[in-house]
Structures are given as structure tokens and as C-alpha cells.
Amino acid sequence: MTAPEFSRTERLDTIGEGERTIAITANDAERAALAKRFDLISVDRLEAKFAVRRDAAGVVARGTVSAAVVQACSVTDDPLPVTVEEPIALRFVDHEPDSEEIELDPDALDTMVFDGAAIDLGEAAAETMALSLDPFPRGPNAAAALKAAGVISEEEAKPAGALAGLKEALEKRLDRS
């Protein structure tokens, strides 16, 4: 397995039970590699600030991921500048959770598995950035390009086939009753 493009590891023996602040920033080469990995035109800035501490279940990291990226419009491929300011709250654990149950506790943290020796805050920041982006971004020219290609909007679409007149037929039948 290859190392992540933006790796900032913190050894467990440097993380105590008291909170410690860690700030990280991706360099030019890391940002270019992340742009390729996440199919972005560019990653112009990626940084994160974490408050990190150990607890009985692992390592807790809370903070903010900040980024400036350029995505391609999913319709026209026009460049779309996007900024990210995303809160992050993770618990790093050294094993997969035993249970497949999902707890909907508002204080529950997302979990990331680590090797037991060090956590990777860079990979956590990169994944958070990627997950916060619109998977199908549309620029200002997207609607016109779709219309020119003959794609109609949902509002313009009408029920088709055997169900086309069903609603009106049911309403007429109810009115007669």
C-alpha cells in the first residue's frame, strides 16, 4: 500500500491526555497529487488545525479543514473555484469496531483506524476536504448547455406512458363521488 499524498503523522507517544494543537499545511507537490487523486483541476490551498488528545477509546481530533480548490463543472468542464471550511471531529482507533450497529448519538465521532503507533492527520484532512465537495458541481453555463443538448429540466418533464393521465382520472372519479 502506498503512502497518502498528504501524510502528517503524529506518533502516539507524543499525544497526551491533555489537549495539544497541531496545524498542518499541504505543499505544492502534495496539493498537485491530491488534485489528481480527487479528480480536481487544482488544490490551491489545504490546511487544517486540530486539537488532539488521547482518551480511553483512542485519540480524539477536533478542528477545522480549510481549502481552496478548483473543480470542473460536471456539464461543461468549466473551472469552478470552491472554498472549504469544514469542521472535523474524529476518533482514531487501533481496530475496526466490533459491532455493525450504527449509533445515532449526536456526540458520536467518526472513526478512522490507525496502526496503533501513529495517526495521520494529513489523510484525515484530505478525506474531509474531498467529502465536503459537491460531487456534481454545476457552473453558471450548465443549464444553457443542457438545454442546447436537448436535456429538459425536471420541471419541464411530464409523466409519460400509461400513467400520464392517472392523476386527472382519479381526481375526476373522486369529484363524481
Image (cartoon, rainbow, N blue to C red):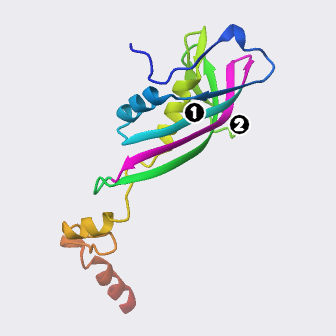
Q: Locate residue 150, reporting x and y percent.
A: 19, 69
Looking at the image, is 89 positioned above or below residue 10? below
Residue found at the far bottom of this picture: 176
Q: Locate residue 5, reporting x and y percent.
A: 44, 23
Task: Say which mark, if any, is on residue 107.
Answer: 2
**Mark 2: few/some/many CA within 10 Å (<14, 14-19, 20+):** few
Residue in the image at 52% along x and 29% along y: 26
Q: Secondary structure at mark 1?
A: loop
Q: CA distance from mark 1 to mark 2?
A: 13 Å
Query: Which quadrant of the structure image shows residue 37?
Result: top left
Q: Which residues are magenta?
A: 52-73
Mark 1 highlights which residue? 102
Nearer to the camera, 69 or 54 = 69
Q: Amino acid at mark 2?
A: Asp
Q: In the figure, is residue 21 to the left or right of 168?
A: right
**Mark 1: few/some/many CA within 10 Å (<14, 14-19, 20+):** few
Nearer to the camera, 60 or 129 = 129
How many marks can you see?
2
Location of the N terminus (image quadrant):
top left
Question: Magenta part mainly helix, strand or loop?
Answer: strand
Residue in the image at 55% along x and 31% along y: 125
Nearer to the camera, 92 or 7 = 7
Looking at the image, is 26 positioned above or below residue 146? above
